Image (cartoon, rainbow, N blue to C red):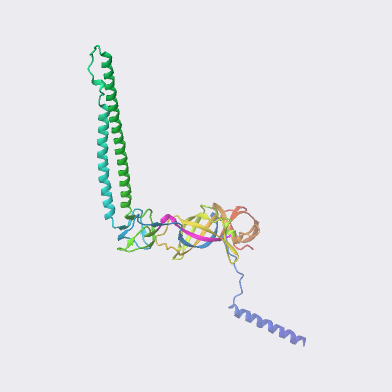
Amino acid sequence: MKVWWLAGGAAALAVAVVVGVVLTGGDPVAPAKAATAKVTRGSVTTTVSAAGTVQAQQSRTLGFTGGGTLTELNVKPGDVVAAGMVLARIDATAAQESVDAAEESVDSAQDALDRAETAQATAASTPTATASRPPGSQSGSQGGSQGNGQSGGQSGGQGQSNTVQIASDNLLSAQQRLNNAKLTLVQANAKLAGTVITAPVAGKILAVNGTVGSNAGSSVITLAGTGDVVVKAQFTEAEVAHLKLDQVARITLPDNPGAKYDGKVIQIDPAGTVSNRLVRYAALIAFDKVPDTLLYGQSATVAVVTASADGVLSVPSTAVHDGKVVVRVNGRDEERAVETRLRGDVNTEITSGLAEGDEILTAGR
């Protein structure tokens, strides 16, 4: 019995060896190689990411100062326009007639003012009656003569004073008339200018209300300025705690996922909104340069850089565990304590314990 049991055990062992050789293709199983990486010098960044939508932070409603028939419409929704471009016009016949009439009124008032100034100057320079009285004539009736002279001088002086006052009043009236005429001309020119809509800033047309031949008023075109385009993204409570104004952001659009557009944080809402018991805070990220193909309402992803360090030693974050890394030296692995500072999204900054070029295990021991 004992001999049989031993023989059976040997046979079973032989079978197991054969099966093992067959399953491994005849070669012994080698231990998996540990992934390694070099200690490098470069940048370490940490970001918070969120999804959002592209929208106009501010839009402008453009129209005419008065109603009229739309005679020219040069844009449609989606068009990109430059500042100063003529977007639309209405019939300006009546407005031009008002300007012509106002200009004639100004010319007439100016002529009247010129005449009033001349009359006022003439009245002021006219000599009094006493100034032309002949000298001498001392007689027995000297007192009476003197009295008559004084009376005549006084009458002449009063007449002179009245003439000057009338001329001064006429001059003031003429000046007021000219001022009113000029104001009317300014208003008429403003109304004429209001028959044309020009783009106040470069931007994109969001909406157009009206067609050529229809009556148009104060709301015809909606324009979003180039600098007014933002991504409104929602961040969690933990994420928004790291956000600050003017932080750099990278924006990704679904129609071109390989492109990264630069931007920055321009607004962080102080109050959050609750959705499914999760509080989120909205933040606005503005484009540094808005893409020409940008579509309002399209989705976008933003990654805001909340901290960064440049020109520092770093290793993959997966290599650091409890302040230690595994370093490979001359084919042997040894554990080494390191000091770290910034733990980024991919790499961790090393301040001591390693040198540039050291080989470390990326997943520790």
Q: Could you tell me residue 267's position as x and y percent?
A: 51, 54
From the viewer's side, name the closer residue of 93 and 298.
93
- Quadrant showing the C terminus: bottom right
From the viewer's side, name the closer residue of 178 and 237.
178
In the rendered view, does 201 fall on the left or right side of 276?
left
From the viewer's side, name the closer residue of 116 and 220.
116
Task: Name the residue: 28% across, 14% down.
Answer: 143
Main secondary structure found in the magenta portion: strand
Is 143 above or below relative to 272?
above
Q: Could you tell me residue 246's position as x and y percent?
A: 51, 52
Q: Is residue 224 magenta?
A: yes
Residue 71 occupies quadrant = bottom left
Is 297 above or below relative to 117?
below
Q: Is residue 277 magenta?
A: no
The answer to whether residue 316 shows anywhere in this view is no
In the rendered view, does 174 fall on the left or right side of 295?
left
Task: Name the residue: 29% across, 53% down.
Answer: 95
Residue 334 occupies quadrant = bottom right
> Residue lying furthest right in this view?
1
From the viewer's side, name the closer residue of 166 and 150.
150
In the rendered view, does 181 fall on the left or right side of 283?
left
- Quadrant showing the N terminus: bottom right
Q: Could you tell me residue 59's position as x and y percent?
A: 43, 57
Span colored in magenta? 223-236
In the rendered view, does 358 fall on the left or right side of 150?
right
Residue 166 occupies quadrant = top left
The answer to whether residue 103 shows anywhere in this view is yes
